[in-house]
Amino acid sequence: MSTADKFVGIQISPISFIDEGVEPLLDTLQEKFGINVLLIGTISWLGLKVGRRISYELDGFPDHGVQEPDQMLGGSYIKHRPEYYRNTQISHFTNRDPGLEEKDILDMIIPAARARGMKVMPEVMEPLFKYAGHGSANTVPIPNLPQYLEVDQFGRFGSEPSTSNPHYRTWLHSILEDYARNYDIDGIMWCNERRSPLDNLIAGNPAIDFSAAARTEAHERGIDVQRVLSAFGEVYNYFQRARRGEGGKDGYFVEFLRVLLQNPEILIWERFWLERNQALDRELYGIVKWCNPALSFGLNVWNRNHFNPIRKAQWPWLEQTEFCDWVKPITYQHQAGAVYQKEMSDFHQSILRDFTPPEMTSMMYNLLGLGEAPWDDLLGQGMQPESYVGGQARDTVAAVEGRVPVYMGIGVDAPRTHPDQAKCTPDIVYRSVLAAYQAGAKGVVYSPNYAGMNQSSLAGGAQALRELGLLT
């Protein structure tokens, strides 16, 4: 493995540079762990992106940094430049976190990173605001933001802004233009983790997005929104009955096919929503490239895309290479068992209720290209580095057909949600890094946030890098 193309990244929040000091922290990351790419959370209202460890009540605090909860309020961690936001009504979104207010985290870090030959890339993940399991801030004090929220099939405002709303969409455009024009960065990593209308139904929630902006776009495409809403009423009732255990005589799966065939409008709406969502990724890629063609645009790709057969069909890797320069599949191995069980539990409460989870697991593994522990052992064992990280690396490398490099997202102390859930260990990180490179990946990204990682776990990755000749 050549050191010339080395890409060993780490996702890191602004608070770590305040807690540990910019230069001492960069020295530690580079010299002890071989990090040469910093993926910095620059805007978020999620503790997982910009705060300290969010699972401290279950896992305690890591072996570095400040050993107490933060007072994260969220927001933007760079200087506000109003001239970049004149085409959107979203304003007043700079952070108010103690110790970080009025600081520009990129201005703080870039000179020291450049002096060490390290690359810097802002990391932006959408949803930005209220996201279960990600340590969301209690409030988001952006004036007028509630007016831009999604609307569900019953006419109720949702918890996230509509990606069809022109002010919200333009705001995201403006954020990336701001980064691309004003900082000596090497690229941007973008992550899109929105649930589709069908996703929401399977999870027991109403379908989205029927906001005025989305309705207008649908009308322009010749979609009869009232017929779509009527169809979603039927399909929503099916999912609610199924989750109550009220199945038809022909079984839950057949009944799902029947209600789907009787209401094809839901697939029309699903495709419409998906195309608009994917178009956002394309737009952001284009904006970055127009502002500075030298910048790389990377996609941080949701693990649900390989744990859910519907999403896997919707987000093919080769298509995504049309609007990125590299991809980072999320493979947080010790956390993955619980994530997979949550994903499949939604299916087993509805479409797959005819089967017990243990009965269906081996078949679903075949469908998804997985080969992990039986259902009852997944929570405690997680997924194995060789089969899971290595397997996803091989599949992704093959799927992108050499068009872009693959940098595997290695889970390092990703937050746990249950005391019986598998824990990360140095050996897991060591084996994951080796498995990624051996399967053809061109790099790794330690994830999801340095502030939640143990340095002892990162040491496992460092050992693997030494064996690969990427760290002396």
Image: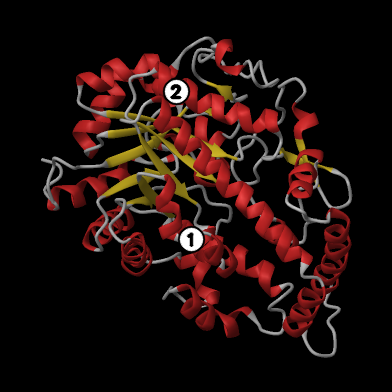
Question: Up-down: is 31 above or below 83?
Answer: below
Residue 424: give x, y in percent of width and height.
40, 53
Q: Amino acid at mark 1?
A: Ala
Q: Residue at x 69, y 59 (%)?
A: 270
Residue 69 visible in the picture: no
**Residue 336, label in figure:** 1
Question: Up-down: is 379 above or below 136?
Answer: below
- Disc 2 crowd, CA 10 A, few/some/many (<14, 14-19, 20+): many
Residue 303: give x, y in percent of width and height.
49, 57
Q: Residue at x 64, y 36 (%)?
A: 136
Q: Within the image, what quadrant is residue 420 found in?
A: bottom right
Q: Residue at x 27, y 42 (%)?
A: 8
Residue 332: give x, y in percent of width and height.
43, 55
Q: In the shown orientation, is residue 322 left or right of residue 209?
A: left
Q: Secondary structure at mark 2?
A: helix
Of circles 2 and 1, the one toward us is 2
Q: In the shown orientation, is residue 230 left or right of residue 436?
A: right
- Disc 1 crowd, CA 10 A, few/some/many (<14, 14-19, 20+): many
Residue 192: give x, y in percent of width and height.
55, 45
**Residue 179, label in figure:** 2
* Foreground of the two, 6 or 133: 6
Q: Amino acid at mark 2?
A: Tyr
Question: Up-down: is 436 above or below 447?
Answer: below
Q: In the shown orientation, is residue 319 left or right of residue 470?
A: right
